[in-house]
Structure formats: structure tokens, C-alpha cells
Image (cartoon, helix red, strand yellow):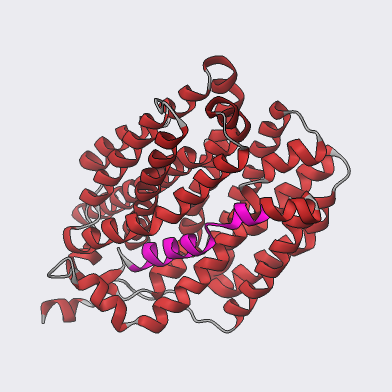
Amino acid sequence: MADFSGKELQANSDRWHAMSAGFLGWTLDAFDFFVVIFLLDTLAAHFRVPKRDIVLTITATLAMRPVGALLFGMMADRYGRRRPLMANVLFFSAVELLCGFAPNYTAFFVLRMLFGVGMGGEWGVGASLAMEHAPVRWRGVLSGILQSGYSIGYLLAAFAARLVLPNWGWRAMFWVGGLPALLALYIRTKVPESEAWKQHRVARTIDGPKIAWQHKWLSLYMIALMFMMNCLSHGTQDLYPDFLKHAHGIAPNTVAYVTMFYNVGAVTGAVIFGLLSERIGRRYSMLAALAVAVAIMPVWAFGSTLAMLAIGAFIMQMGVQGAWGNIPVHLNELSPDAIRGLLPGFTYQVGILLAASTPTIQFALRDRLGYPWALTAFELVVMGLLSLLLIFGRERHGRTFLREPEAVAA
């Protein structure tokens, strides 16, 4: 009995460390991405370029993420989750640090492209590691917690914009982003390898894309889903601080506080709708979250006071990230066992590639429709199409990732 208890305690410890690695990796990765969101005006002035050129670096980062997902995902299915995750963390941390030393716009643009490679590799590997360790009955809520790392990274970037930027300047914002390299040491010493990977590992690195091609219709559906999901999130987040400043005249320091506030809503929504998915399924939980987002949209975009805008943004991100909270578990459950390191992350990041022009499109629509309608019209179309994909889509709620003991013994 004591041995059984010891094994159970070790298993729980392993799950905790795997979940922590995935969560922290995604949190710190997101922080490094969102730093630029708070520096649009500052970087444009420093590099003496139009602000749209800085917005273009966001698009470049998003567009390069599939490259990282492919490279690190293939390695994760061949060599395990831990080593590729460590390599990824070291890579994106080093690039983020170098962004703080960029001498000109061209160098900065290239570095943000390279950062996109690192950012694209982290999510798929970290999510597969976390979900393969998670107990089946807790996958939904743990998926929500894992995905909320993105919102917490956004919140930390807003916090840095309030404290680091005024005191040490924009370069220090990127230097702080180099600290996640320390996470590689934690992964090396504490995080166990995935048992599911050991059972289903591919013999050759190139086998992953071949298996994905054998499941091409599933892959295409997942890409379409992630295209819409990324239009949803980036369309409600990337330009919203700029919208508050320039459409409503809100001071930058206040914008940082509002951003922190609505990211608390994002974390709350991810956990609530992740938990709800265990009762009603992944797709219906996501549809419920979208309904919340649609209902609050008039307040989110057209609120006449700071309080209304802040509350609207809080509830909007509850809905948006409530839907997103289901994505790690939903994509991992849909994926074939042998390519769980590759397919969720790659389809996610191809969706990013297709949605990479979202902030650029919205910024262009602003000149034609005005900022509130540019955000609103774009997101109404996205939410409508996304709802159709979910209604007519598929899911494999609660499937096992491990072979039965008899099958393993055989």
C-alpha cells in the first residue's frame, strides 16, 4: 500500500511539472510576443518609420510560426517532448534578448521573424507534453489553465509597459524577455518524458509529415478551425491598446491597467469554459464562449466611458479566451497518436500564417470605417464562420492517449 501511495505521489508530481513546463513556456513566449504591442509608437519614433511598419513586424512574427511548429514538432515526435522544448525555450529567449540590441529597423524586422520560429515551436510541444500527462477527467480545466498562459503573458507585458518602459526604456523590455532561458534548466531537471510518446514514437523524423498527409482532411479541418480562432484572438487583442489610445484618447498608463484587467477576464474565461467542456463537450463549450463575446461586442467597441470599455473588454476576453481554453485539449484529442507533437502545433501555426494579416487588415479598415467599426465588422464575420465550423465539426472528447496494457504487452 505504501508503494502504491508513493507511485501515486510521483505520478502527481510528474503531472504537475509537465503542466508547469507547458504553462510557463507559453506564458513567457506570449510575454515576448506582446512586448511589441505596447511599443508601436515608441519603436516607430526610434527607428523613424511609419507605425504601420512596426505593425508589419507583428505580421512577420505570426507568419513565421508554422516554420517553428514544423521543425520542433517533427523533433518532438521523434526525440520526445523534453529536449525539443528545452531547445525551443533557449532559442526564443536568445532572439528576444537580441531584439533589445537591434541597431535599425531592418535588423529588428529580421529578429522578429526569427522570434516567430521560436514562438511557433513552443505551443505544440508544450501542449502535447502537458495534455499527455493530464488525467482524462481534468483535461478540460487543465487545458484552460495551459492556454491562459497566453493571457498571463499579455498581462505581464502590460505590467512591464507600466514599470520597465518608463524607467529603463524600450530596449529593457526585450532584455527582460531573455529571462525565460532559465526555464530550460527546470525542464531538464524536473519534467519527465511523456509515456504516450514512448508508446507511439515515430521511427524517423520525416514520418510525421507523411502521417499527417494520410490524415489530410482532418488536418485541413484543424487548419480552418485555427485560422478562424487566430482571427478571433488577434482581432480582439493586438490593436486594442492602440484603439483605446487613439479612438478614445485614453492615456498610455491607463491603457496598461485596462489591459491587465481584461487579461484577468481572459484567464477566468479559459478556466471556466475549459471546465464546462468536461460536461457539454469541447465544441459546445466553445460555442457558449462565442455567444458571450458576441453579446458584449457593442460595449467592447462602442462604450462611451472608460468603465464601459474596461468591462466590455473584460467580458470579451472571457469569451474569446474561453473558446481558446479548449484548444489544447481539443486539438490533442483530435490528433493521431504518432504525430501529437507535430499536428496540433503545426495546424495551429498554419492558422496563424493565414491569419497573420489580421492586424494589418484591421488597421487599414480603420481608415475607411473608423476604429470601432473596423474591429466590430471584422470580428462579426469571424465569429459567424467559426460557429459554423464548430457546429459541423468533430471532436473526440475524453479519448485515451495510452495503449491498453494488453496491447502494450502484445
Q: Which percent across, then down, holds residue 123?
A: 39, 54
- Between 27 and 375, the one lying in front of the other is 375
256, above or below 66, in the image: above
Q: Is residue 306 visible?
A: yes
- Between 19 and 36, the one lying in front of the other is 36
Q: Residue at x 21, y 58 (%)?
A: 75
Q: Which percent across, then down, holds residue 48?
A: 57, 29
Q: Is residue 273 visible?
A: no
> Is residue 252 toward the left or the right of residue 266 in the image?
right
- Between 122 and 326, the one lying in front of the other is 122
> Is residue 255 toward the left or the right of residue 22 in the image?
right
The N terminus, quarter of image: bottom left
The C terminus, quarter of image: bottom left
The magenta stretch is 343-362
239, above or below 161, in the image: below
Q: Residue at x 66, y 38 (%)?
A: 259
Q: Which percent across, then down, holds residue 14?
A: 28, 50
> Is residue 64 toward the left or the right of residue 283 in the image?
left
